[in-house]
Image: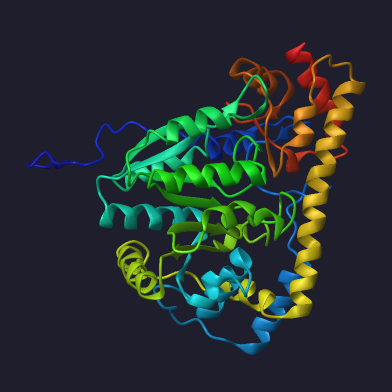
Amino acid sequence: MTTNPLNCLMFENLQPAPPDSILGLTEAFLKDPRPEKINLSVGVYQDARGKTPTLESVKEAERRLLASDVGKSYLPISGLAEYAAGVQGLLFGDSHEIVISGRASTAQTPGGTAAVRAAADTIYRLHPTAKVWISQPTWPNHPSIFSAAGLKVEIYPYFDAEKNGLALDAMLKTLSKAPPGSVVLLHGGCHNPTGVDPTPEQWRKIADVIFAHHLFPLVDFAYQGFGDGIHEDTVGINAICRPGHEAMICSSFSKNFGLYAERVGALTVVAADRASAEASMSHVKTCIRSNYSNPPAHGARIVATILSDSNLRAQWEQEVAAMRDRINGMRRTFVETMRKVGSTRDWSFIEQQRGMFSFSGLTPVQVDQLRSEYAIYIVGNGRINVAGMTEQNLTPLCKAIAAVTE
């Protein structure tokens, strides 16, 4: 046996890294042999049968792409131009002053996660001392992404646990004290993990504070169409993107197009004018080049095909509405079923929340009890994926939750 004379083995005596707080639960769920197990942890839409469907509009777009034989060559660093145009149309509408003036520029990314990372890398490249303020709570991967990019992370209050609602006053008070030039990460809708979104009036107040104190808004917009509607869910974007002001918007089409495995996202930079937008995108592209070089093509071509065809677009919007209606319907049914199984708690806040997720109020101890005794998998902070509920699993789920909370 030989030894390394320089004693520079990188992996010798290495301890395993801790599992991801969400994806690690899915691994444990898959290994669980109990047939009655329920997974409400991972953020994936499921239909009434508990399956993640491929949308019919997506299938038709794929048939057209196969027939057209577009090839498999590399895309540009910023991706497909027609995809970028479709993304901006979804965010702002084709007649918005941002689109007409050309003061937005969009780069296609491998999912929303890569969009956030590309934004973080660009911010660090241009303003390395800027701090990023994130909501408490937020998606667990957010702080990891910004820290990995070299940025310092601060926290602002968001969720009022007593009222199961938005802690607006505390949020605005904290943000008003953030140093000028700070980055404020906002969830564009269907807040993950709470499901609590600002009202249009609250969005205006948030935007007022951001601009009055010279802060920079970075919007993570992963669930467009899952709240109140494809257009209705842009209320926060419209409040933030005022004439002459800057922003970054990270889009994901995993959920609303069902393209989880295709990794389809986008980073849109909104600048004061066209020249500034083009200059900022050059820095985004530099960051992308040193990371993943250029994005995958197939998923973006699907999205671009659907958004550029009026019939496919209408079909897709109907499918998004059906997914949204199922989620909101399960919220109502959950509240009703909790009442039927004898729970004395007021669960009505579940029905008021929006998107796939709900901050249930379950404690870590209760979450552990649900997993060990009832084979129900929920994220440790009590976040529930409402889309994982079905007519078949709802009654046993509610009985178990009632048992650990009463």
The residue furthest left is 5
Give the image quarter of residue 55.
bottom right
Report whether 190 appears left or right of 264: right
Report whether 398 appears left or right of 355: right
User: Relative to the observer, which residue lies in front, 245 or 322?
Assistant: 245
Q: Position of residue 62 (x, y in %)?
A: 68, 76
The residue furthest right is 340
Q: Tell me, what colour scheme is on the image?
A: rainbow
Residue 266 higher or lower than 233, as above or below: below
Residue 101 higher or lower than 283, as above or below: below
Residue depicted at 51% across the width and 47% down the height? 207
Q: Position of residue 23 (x, y in %)?
A: 55, 40
Q: Position of residue 77 (x, y in %)?
A: 39, 73
Report whether 19 appears left or right of 227: left
Which image quadrant: the C terminus?
A: top right
Give the image quarter of residue 317.
bottom right
User: In this rendering, does residue 136 appear at all?
Assistant: no
Residue depicted at 89% across the width and 20% down the height? 341
Which image quadrant: the N terminus?
A: top left
Residue depicted at 57% across the width and 63% down the height? 262
The residue furthest bottom is 68
Q: Position of residue 131 (x, y in %)?
A: 33, 41
How many numbered discs, if any? 0
User: In this rendering, does residue 135 appear at all?
Assistant: yes
